Image (cartoon, rainbow, N blue to C red):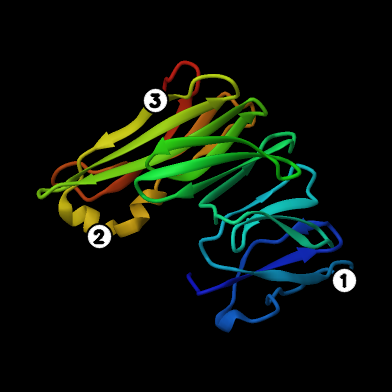
């Protein structure tokens, strides 16, 4: 289901931010059925359907794309951190750092902030970045999708970058295929949001979706579990 806007709410009893609601006509209140008496719903603001949001590990702070990158706290005002609207947001495991990605379909800028919004690092990568994740406060994973088009079709590739402070940026290839022109046209810009990267609880493995475009077969996704150190899948 898709609508032009989503509304952001908070349960004051549990102090957690409820999921974006897909509301008909951008209504001001989410239609929750059978909400327990001890809980209430408070409207915090509105964001577009493709706006990322990330919870701080303390469950009271959050970061959201709302006319740029903003950080808020439950029951408090939202503070603007960066004027560029991010495609992805991720807090480090302790909440000491936050990463956001901005840019075009060809190049992206990953900005690392401290929890108070101070810029600590800027990282430039090739491709469009919709997926970020921290394995620890010292390492950030960046999934970048690149698409090059030709008269007969194109090339689709995914690189997994590993950023560590004061170290050279490294990467490995997660996918490299040549979709037909008709496949590229069918997917449109959604092809740049095709990785869906998640990190395991022990931070030693990732799970992600790999787009497959075999000849004479419809495009489909493969769910892949990959060990970060060995590269085995």
Which residue is more in the foreground, 24 or 113?
113
Q: Which of marks 1 and 2 is nearer the N terminus?
A: 1
Front tag of 1 and 2: 2
Q: Residue furthest top?
A: 230
Which residue is more in the foreground, 113 or 130?
113
Local secondary structure at mark 3? strand
Q: In this view, does 102 lie above or below 167?
A: below
Pointer 1 local density, CA inside 10 Å: few below 14, some 14–19, many at least 20 = few
Q: In this view, does 46 lie above or below 92?
A: below
Q: Classify residue 160 by image quadrant.
A: top left
Which mark is on residue 37?
Answer: 1
- Please say if the residues under marks 1 and 2 sit with CB atoms less than 8 Å apart: no
For mark 3, what is the residue? 172
Local secondary structure at mark 2? helix
Q: Earlier in the sequence, mark 2 or mark 3?
A: 3
Image point 74% across, 41% down: which residue? 115
Q: How far apart are marks 2 and 3 (CA)?
A: 27 Å
């Amino acid at each position: 289901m898709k609508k032009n806007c989503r509304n952001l709410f908070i349960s004051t009893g549990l102090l957690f931010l409820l999921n974006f609601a897909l509301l008909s006509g951008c209504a001001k209140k989410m239609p929750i059925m059978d909400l327990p008496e001890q809980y209430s719903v408070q409207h915090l603001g509105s964001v577009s359907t493709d706006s990322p949001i990330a919870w701080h590990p303390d469950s009271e702070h959050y970061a959201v794309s709302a006319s740029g990158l903003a950080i808020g706290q439950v029951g408090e005002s939202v503070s603007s951190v960066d004027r560029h609207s991010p495609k992805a947001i991720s807090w480090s495991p302790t909440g000491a750092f936050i990463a956001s990605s901005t840019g075009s379909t060809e190049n992206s800028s990953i900005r690392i902030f401290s929890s108070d919004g101070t810029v600590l690092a800027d990282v430039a990568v090739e491709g469009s970045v919709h997926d970020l994740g921290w394995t620890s406060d010292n390492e950030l994973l960046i999934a970048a999708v690149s698409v090059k088009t030709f008269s007969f079709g194109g090339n689709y590739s995914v690189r997994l970058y590993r950023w560590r402070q004061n170290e050279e940026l490294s990467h490995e290839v997660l996918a490299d295929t040549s979709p037909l022109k008709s496949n590229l046209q069918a997917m449109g810009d959604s092809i740049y949001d095709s990785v869906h990267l998640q990190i395991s609880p022990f931070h030693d493995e990732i799970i992600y979706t790999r787009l497959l475009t075999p000849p004479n077969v419809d495009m489909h996704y493969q769910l892949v579990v990959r060990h970060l150190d060995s590269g085995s899948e």
